[in-house]
Amino acid sequence: MDVIKADILILGAGGAGLFAALHAYDRHPRLKIVIATKGLIGKGGCSRMVQGGMNVVLNEKDSLENHFLDTLKGGGFINNQALAWTLVSDAPKAVYELEVKVGCFFDRDEDGRIHQKPFAGQSFDRTVHVADLTGIQLISRMTDQIFARNIKVFEETRGLDLLTSKDGHRIVGALLSDIRTGEIFVVNSKVTIVATGGCASMYKISAPSFDKTGDGMAICFRAGAEFVDMEMVQFHPTGLVAGRSRLNGSLLEEGLRGAGARLYNGLGERFMERYDPERLERSTRDRVARSSFIEIMAGRGTVNKGVYLDASHLGAEFVEKKFPGMVERVKDIGKDLAREKVEVTPTAHYQMGGVCIDAQCQTNLKGLLVCGEDAGGVHGANRLGGNGICDSTVYGRRAGDTAALLALEEDLHPYQEAEAEKMRMRWLKPFLRERGENVYEIRSEIENLMWEKAGLVRTRLHLQEAAYHLENLIQKIDEASVADRYLARYNMEWNHIIDVANLITVCRMVVNAAKCREESRGAHYREDFPETDNENWLQNIYQKKGTAFQLELTKKPVLLSHFKRENIEDCFFERVKKKRTYTESCDGSTCL
Amino acid sequence: MPDSLHVKVFRFNPDRDVEPRFDNFEVPVFDNMALLDVVMHIQNCLDRSLSFRFSCRIGMCGSCAMYVNGRARLVCRTQVSSLRTQDITIMPLPNFPIIRDLVVDMAPFFEKWKKIKPYYVSNKEISEPVVVRPGSGEREIIDDMLDCITCGCCYSACSMVATNSEYLGPAALNRAYTLIADKRDAIRVERLKTVDRSYGVWRCHTQFNCAEVCPKNIVPTRSIQNLKRRCVLHKFGIVK
Ligand SMILES: Cc1cc2nc3c(=O)[nH]c(=O)nc-3n(C[C@H](O)[C@H](O)[C@H](O)COP(=O)(O)OP(=O)(O)OC[C@H]3O[C@@H](n4cnc5c(N)ncnc54)[C@H](O)[C@@H]3O)c2cc1C
Ligand code: SF4
Ligand code: SF4
Ligand code: FES
């Protein structure tokens, strides 16, 4: 096996990975930095796909405190408050840097200053953007900056597993595979940053890019990292229904509902009147998504198992002018968003849970930093639109700074060759088998299982079933084989087997934590425990690998470092009052 | 729509094959089927050894460009019905080395991209976002040209690229324009020199092949024309 020595190894080149590389380099240009990404540089991942924009406090009438409180409220108050505070207070620095150093140009207001638009769940218009395609600009410009620096880029190269030092106490790099040649090699590094962007793609209907399969999380799990609140997965209410096409589940942006688009079920009822009569379609993401899901599951959906999104009453001209990207996307399935109703479905979108980090992106494992969607705690039980790319840029910068400091302090520790060899053999196993399980069938089994048993509406029984099936699927994926046994060069099937093995690893944590949290909060809804229970559940759920790949789970009260319990009670009291009034006004049976 | 498609797929594995071949597949049609669904179906169900590249599936990453029925396209953004035929031939993008089957090596494209110094260089005097009113004309046509997703379609369609291995090509020149016209940038003049060469802007013959295939409706030819004008002005000492 080839071995490359480096100061810093970064897995993933989304907003988090790229910013980490730039910051580490700019701190100390002499550091040897290697960035490995599963796609082409600047092309993989979801940062690229960001449509809406990024939240940041720039206006003097707004305040960091407001952004912070919005983030906590959105997160059902189980956020790691120190991380949430860092998010909001670093965001202005990140945006300035993107404009002034990286060369992005955000859309301007009439007065020539950066324009900020409204996004759901926020007390102030604070989302900066580049039309409805923000991500293309952010990631393209950051990638260009990588080209300006002496940073080693391995494209189409995936991390397989983390390597540990001889004493077992430290992460000292990773085993990687070059997708183009199939070769497996080692990068031995002082610091390793994981930024591979989570994996909401474990569900039948989902929005992320296809290269995201929870690799980073699974890699960290196997190495012994600790995770927080893995039950929290966000579903976006308006994914496009496109049948068997890969377009299925791709996003129609939230701004449509903001502008007044309505939702109808298959019977033509405006069903949000029953779930949230006050805010209707402008209710929060989790609530609208869940309501649609309940309608669909109750058989009141459309023929294609969706609900209708109708923007036509807003006027064709208005819709075409305000949402050109969305109109075009819908045109791909032969529909006219500006003039007719379009079928939509909830779609899995984002993972709030992830690896536990501190504000310096350090984990429980020495030498391992995690940032972006792979990390957990910042968003609590639900993420605000616009806080995702904010998280990646803010914590990407921080991970880069921390890595540079650590790399200067530390020596390079050798890795364990036997361990690396064992890992390599494990991943090569599918080639040794003449006949075995079909990975594509396993993938769709997982997606259906998660959608039905561990998705928008959960119960103990369903989660138990899911947990049971996942154990079987682990066995099955271990017995998968590849059709082209002789060539590892750009072997998509082999890579998919690795993807799916990782995916199941992450699914297990999601299901296990969801089973444990016996209440409903944010994105996590338990039909058997429909209330939010602040008495018992202002808690975070932690998990890590126990003996023999078992899950070790613990609960700890949320650390209320900035925002105290009394204040939280006040916020909830306001909500409960509101809820009473609308419970009375609806028929009761399906109320949430 | 017909029930099925006759699909011819280009196959080549440099490790094993002496020369490329075409494989034929019958692919069932379903509603809203994009070309990406066609190659996915083949790979998942008919021949698992096929290789191709994609990521976002919604036309934002520029990973999935292929040469289909005589034209460079993003397969994720091309509906099968728009081809108006049952016969589909899928090949890798021309003007690029082949890694395997439909996967090409984008390196030549990015090597040229790097030659024009594609990175913004910050001006020490600017410490915060500049004030630019939307209608002021200050940004010229930069913002229309910034949506490039580096998919390589234009590069594969440009006959000048095909015949001159040194020619920078439409995407890199378009990127150069968006920086040279950006008054915030500190090395505009230096960058202008990288394109004011025979293998730079002066090689473009203004045939618009690039604009015709660009999935983002960018017109690199316009950017190149603007650059040519700037090069001339610069010779007379005028820097705009
Ligand atoms: C369609 C869509 C729209 C969105 N819109 C918004 C929005 O408007 N505002 C907002 O704030 N958030 C939005 N989000 C969420 C936002 O995109 C994410 O929060 C954020 O981009 C995550 O950034 P990241 O850097 O952690 O990961 P990503 O940007 O997803 O990058 C992950 C990187 O890791 C690489 N990778 C994966 N596996 C491996 C491996 N094994 N080895 C090496 N590399 C690997 C990938 O190729 C990729 O380069 C949206 C998400 C989606 C899917
Ligand atoms: S207009 Fe210029 S860049 Fe575009 S295809 Fe023609 S020669 Fe190439
Ligand atoms: S200019 Fe258009 S065709 Fe060329 S690389 Fe950019 S997006 Fe693709
Ligand atoms: S897959 Fe991203 S552009 Fe087609």
Image (tube, coloured by chain):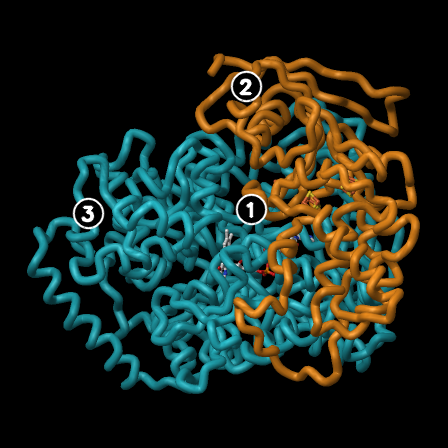
Chain colours: A cyan, B orange
Of B1 and A400, nearer the camera is B1
Q: Is mark 2 within 8 Å of ligand 4?
A: no
Q: Are discs 1 and 3 less than 8 Å apart at CB?
A: no
Task: Say which of marks 1 and 3 sits in front.
Answer: 3
CA separation in Å, label 1 and label 3: 34 Å
Q: Quadrant of residue A514?
A: bottom left
Query: Which mark, by number, is residue B84?
Result: 2
Which residue is labeled 3 in the image? A271
Whole-percent x, y for residue B119 in the image? 76, 65
| Residue A6 left/right relative to A69 | right
User: How much space separates mark 2 and mark 3, taking CA atoms?
Assistant: 40 Å
Q: Which quarter holds ligand 2?
A: top right
| Direction from residue A289 to residue A143 in the image, left or right | right
Q: Name which residue type carries label 1.
A: Leu
B47 versus A376 height, above or below? above
- What kind of element bears circle 3? loop
SS of the residue under disc 1: helix
Q: Chain of mark 1?
A: A
Q: Are marks 1 and 3 on the same chain?
A: yes
Q: Position of residue A90 (x, y in %)?
A: 56, 80
For disc 3, the neighbor class at 10 Å (few under 14, some 14 to 19, many from 20) is: many
Query: Is the residue indicated by label 3 positioned so its CB lies within 8 Å of ligand 1?
Result: no
Chain identifier of the residue bearing label 2 in the image: B
Q: Which amino acid lies under the numbered mark 2 shown in the image of this protein?
A: Arg
* Discs 2 and 3 carry the same chain letter: no
* Mark found first going from the N terminus, 1 or 3: 3
Q: Position of residue A136 (x, y in %)?
A: 61, 56
Query: What amino acid type should be assigned to the residue bearing mark 3?
Result: Phe
In the visual, does A249 lie left or right of A373?
left
Chain of the residue on which disc 3 is drawn = A
Q: Disc 1 designates what residue?
A: A503
